[in-house]
Each structure stands twice: as structure tokens, then as C-alpha cells.
Amino acid sequence: MSDSGTFRGRRIAGLYFSGTELRDLLVAWLALGVAFTFFFVNGTAGFDRLLAAGVVLPLLVGLLTAGIAFLLHEIAHKVVAVRYDQIAEFRADNGMLFLAVMSSLLGFIFAAPGAVHHRGRLTNREHGHIALAGPVVNLLLTLVFLPALLLGPVVGSPVIELIGSRGIAINVFLAAFNLIPYGPLDGKTVLGWSKPVWAAVFVPSVLLAVGLVFVGGLGFGGPF
């Protein structure tokens, strides 16, 4: 595949990323970082909080937390697809990215930034493994952000605590959302492969997302 503009294809950690793929990953990362920043301040109602914080730091927190969650989710799909001898590349969906940002301005978010497209012959089991990889990585990432959540109050840093809380919140949200068995989301493919596996991952993900984010308000507090 050809490179795109100034983005030249390169090999990173043994995986080849084309220029187009790198561009799409960057665009989706930036859009989701902005969208989740707006979402956690309740959209336009929280603009004063962003302005009071200087905008830059809130956006950096959004890019760090949403960025890691998104990038590793998509790379997990790619890694497993390549393992099954697929040609796999991420492609952003600009319409869905626009929807993510616009919905976040209204205080909710619909995050479906694009997908890793792959071609080659696969069994249902292999399709299921590729689809499941992203949400599983999101669940594992909650453990990566947990130390920041616990460390923040100890060292007296609301920003570190916020990175931990939003990192956990975004990852459990993405895991639950992507496992919904509808349309192009991962859940439909996983369910088509194995109902028990889908249920074993989807149910805990939903319980965590609802309990921590929508009931417990994890990620919505802090300085911004």
C-alpha cells in the first residue's frame, strides 16, 4: 500500500504500518482525545472548567488516556490478525470521528473511530480472536492505570489521580461499548464465534462500566 503525504511507512516493534495507516491512527487519536476531554466535563457545559485549567493540560490528559486506550486496542487487533497471516491495517472513519466529537459536546459519546481491516482466509474462531483482542487489552489496561489512581492522593497530585481515573474509565467504557453485538462492533464477531466467551467478557465489562463510570462517576471529578 502506498504511503500518504509526509507519513512514510515504517516498521514498529515488528509490525509494518503504512503512511496512510499512521495518518489515520494519528487523526483518530487526536479526535478521540478531544472527544473524551469534552465528555468528562459534560460537553459545552464544562467549557469554563477547561478554560480555567488552560485547555492544554486537559487535552494532554485526554490524549494520554484515550490515546493509549484507542491505540493499543487497535494494535491488538492488528497483532492477532498478523499472527493469523492476514494483511491488516487500521482505517479511520472520519464520519464516526466527527460524530464522536459532536456527541461529546452534548455530554455523551459514541466512540467508533474506525477499524482494523484485514484480508485473507480465516475461521470463525480466528475472526473471534481478532475481534476479542481489542476489548481484552482495554480491560488489562485498567490495571496499568490503577497505580496512578492510587498514587495521586498519596503524592498530592490531582492530575496523576485524574490520569488514573480517566484511564480506567475510558478503558472499561471502550471494552463494554465495543463488545455490544451490533453492526461493525467487535461484539458481533465474538458472539458469532462463541456465545460463552462473549458473555464472559461482555458482562463484566458492562458491570464495570456502569458501576465505575455511570454510577460511581469515575473520571468526572478532579481539577477539570
Image (tube, rainbow, N blue to C red):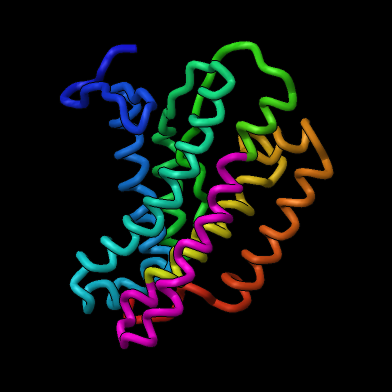
Dominant SS type (magenta) = helix
> Residue 204, how many percent across, how many down?
72, 60
| Residue shown at the point (35%, 74%) measured from the top left | 46
| Residue shown at the point (35%, 23%) measured from the top left | 16
| Residue shown at the point (54%, 77%) measured from the top left | 217
| Residue shown at the point (65%, 66%) measured from the top left | 208
Q: Is residue 135 magenta?
A: yes
In the rendered image, which quarter is residue 65 located in? bottom left
Quick one: 215 or 124, which is closer to the camera? Answer: 124
Quick one: 94 or 122, which is closer to the camera? Answer: 122
Q: Is residue 136 above or below residue 76?
A: below
Question: Residue 130 vs residue 74: left or right?
Answer: right
The answer to whether one can see residue 42 in this image is: no
Quick one: 45 or 168, which is closer to the camera? Answer: 168
Q: Which residues are magenta?
A: 133-162
The answer to whether one can see residue 209 in this image is: yes
From the image, which quarter does the C terminus lie in?
A: bottom left
Question: Residue 19 vs residue 134: left or right?
Answer: left
> Residue 122, how many percent across, how many down?
67, 17
From the image, which quarter does the N terminus lie in?
A: top left
* Outermost residue to the left: 6
